[in-house]
Image (spheres, coloured by chain):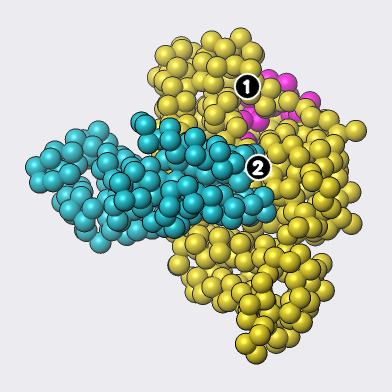
Amino acid sequence: MNGTHLVTKVNSIIEKYNGSQERLIQILLDLQKESGQNYLSEDCIKEVSRILDMPISKVFEVATFYSMFNREPKGKYIIEVCKSAPCHVTGSKNVSKMFEEALNIKMGETTSDNIFTLQYSSCFGGCDVSPAVKINEKIYGNLTMEKINEIIDMYRRK
Amino acid sequence: MAKIVKLISKNCGKIVPGSVEDYVKAGGYTGLRKAMKMDPQEIIEEVKKSNLMGRGGAGYPTGKKWEQAYANPRRPEYVVCNGDEGEPGTYKDRLILSQDPLRLIEGMTIAAYVFNIKEGYIYVRGEYLDLKDTINDAIKNAEEANYLGKNILGSDFSFHIQVVWGAGAYVCGENTALLESIEGKSGRPRKKPPFLTRVGLHQAPTLLQNVETYSNISYIVEHGGEKYHSYGTEYSGGTKLVCLSGNIANKGVYEIPFGTPIREIIYEIGGGIPGGRNLKFVQLGGSSGSCFKDEKLDTPMCYKALKDAGLKLGSGALLVIDDSNCVIDFLKCITEFFIHESCGKCTPCREGNTRIFELLDKLSKGIAGKEDMDRLCEISDLMKKTSFCGLGQAATTALTDCIKYMKDEFLEHIEGYCRAGVCNMSGKEKI
């Protein structure tokens, strides 16, 4: 998102929330989703602060406090491997390894085609199918290498 | 024989989530219709009789909370629902939000009617954004059917609900941090007192409860507090949604009557431990919850019995850990979680968790000494006594319990031996 396009985008999302400073988190969530790269750029944050008439530091504070906000560009799909206790005791380490192998990247990295980012997450409530992963908003569980390859293929084709 | 009772989960999987038509056909909104013919104080009386305790973790009696809020010169002006279940192993609110959101909405509407509140908020953790359409549709459908919004059921009572999404912060499950987050700020806890029923959202008195708590209200109003109470025990009314996770055959959310022994929940409902493994220990109530071994499994699920046994129900998550796991490795995982989730406001929690992790890491590498054990206990005690909010105070509950019940394993690690074979003791040769 560049220049005037960014301004229009930020304006239209803020308008959706009636320009309310109180809806900052919702505004940032929407902006990140529409960024295409799952992140909030510095320009974007500055624009939000200007239009909402809030100090940049306040907007930055919120954008860095919550773990779902990313300050660096990410892949189109973020694969989050849960590393909380229920998944840990059911073998989440193996799941991380399998994804690393299938995507040929390490945890924390993004594939060279910018499609996938692989990272850890705290519990997102997929404990009934642990060890679980979340890809953007969808939860997958009971994973095998075969299933992981199928899932990755499906997202690549999207 | 352990049994499952479906009071609040009866519609789950049976109706189209958020469809008013389906919900009403299944008996929904009978509670609200009845409530609107009752005096608010009568409703509070029924909630008191039900002995419903707050299901978010603290277990404060809901009827008492309502009675106190009603007696305040300035009554609550907002109904807020805490749907930020972040305790690892807890996914019961997810069940209600995804399968029967109207039950929650009806409960909140009854609460709003009691205090004549016009505005409500459902705060849901950002990790559940896949439920956005389901929840929004449920609200829209309820408004269209006149069960929500302006002049509900033709009366002069109006009530609107807004959904607010979190963006990934465990600490927002703490009620005051949650309100900060609704106000669009970083979710750092406020000082208490004043309590929320006096100073809450936008500095106004606020009624705040968990998803599961509100979801019980319509049943209580419809069938009466005594009937609800009769499902549970003397001290804990009704049923509880428990979440089974970890090394257990039937992972899932089950509604059980209070009084069911933990052993029956694990072995009868949960189907026991798969793969021919044995139980090592259980953690109750999420990562901030107590850990215990087999000898406490016969404790009934009931606030009082658990308290007498030195345990806390918390969110109702039951995490089963088998003997392929190492206690030190497990605690490292828990501590990493708290390092990540500490909001950084107070020093004991922000620094304490990191120091504890370093000591556990030394144990897992076989380079810890006896003095490190003392240090662990010292830091843990300090965090309990001096952290600003519940997060830091409870972060080392598992550590304290594990030292208490599995001290031999800590000592083995000091000797350079991990009985589960999980810790690689890589630092040992270097000494």
Residue B220 colored magenta?
Answer: yes
| Crowd class of label 1 (few under 14; some 14 to 19; many from 20; radius 10 Å) | few
Residue B13 numbered tag? 1
Q: Amino acid at mark 1?
A: Gly
Quarter of the figure with residue B402: bottom right
Q: Which chain is yellow?
A: B
* x 59%, y 41%: residue: A143
Closer to the camera in the image, A59 or B2: B2
Q: Is residue B165 left or right of residue A114?
A: right
Closer to the camera in the image, B12 or A131: A131
Chain A shade: cyan
Quarter of the figure with residue B233: top right
Q: Which residues are magenta?
A: B212-229
| Secondary structure mostly taken by the magenta-highlighted segment of the chain | helix
* Residue at the disc numbered 2: B55
Q: Position of residue A17 (x, y in %)?
A: 27, 36
Whether residue B221 appears in this view of the structure is no
Q: Amino acid at mark 2?
A: Arg
Q: CA distance from mark 1 to mark 2?
A: 22 Å
- The quarter of the picture where the N terminus of chain A appears is top left
